[in-house]
Image: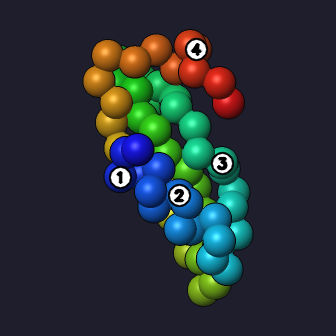
């Protein structure tokens, strides 16, 4: 389990509003990230992720 997956497991059980579920995505420049987006109880939107090297986002289930 990666660091972001471990954090995801803790966050989804918290009071944070999930905006985007944990997923692999290519945001350009050939770097694929695993991450998620939440809104905390104060209304701040946080995108949390980590780079994945050598992965194709189209090959992983959403």
Asked if residue 9 is positioned above or below residue 56 in the image, the reply reads below
In the rendered structure, which disc, 4 or 1, sits on the residue that comes first in sequence?
1
Contact, CB < 8 Å: mark 1 with mark 3?
Answer: no
Residue drawn at the location 65% of the way across and 24% of the way down: 61
Q: Which of marks 2 and 1 precedes in the sequence?
A: 1
* Residue in view at x 69 percent, y 61 percent: 18
- Where in the figure is residue 4, as x and y percent of width and height? 42, 51
Q: Label for residue 13?
A: none
Residue topped by disc 4: 58
Left or right of 58 in this view: 20 = right
**Figure check: 30 above or below 3:** above
Q: Nearer the viewer, mark 4 or mark 1?
A: 1
Judging by the rendered image, the residue that carries numbered circle 2 is 8
Q: Is residue 23 above or below residue 39?
A: above
For the residues carrying marks 1 and 3, which lies nearer the camera in this image?
Answer: 1
| Label 3 environment density (alpha carbons within 10 Å; few <14, some 14–19, many ≥20) | few
User: Disc 4 or disc 2, which is closer to the eye?
Assistant: 2
Q: CA distance from mark 3 to mark 4?
A: 16 Å
The tag earlier along the polypeptide, 4 or 2, is 2
- Side of 52 where 5 appears, left or right: right
Q: Residue at x 33, y 36 (%)?
A: 51
Residue identifier under label 3: 21
């Amino acid at each position: 389990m990666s660091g972001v997956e471990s954090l995801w497991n803790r966050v989804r059980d918290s009071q944070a509003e999930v905006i985007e579920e944990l997923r692999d995505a290519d945001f350009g420049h050939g770097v694929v990230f695993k991450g998620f987006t939440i809104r905390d109880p104060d209304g701040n939107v946080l995108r949390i992720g980590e780079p994945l090297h050598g992965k194709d986002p189209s090959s992983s289930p959403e």
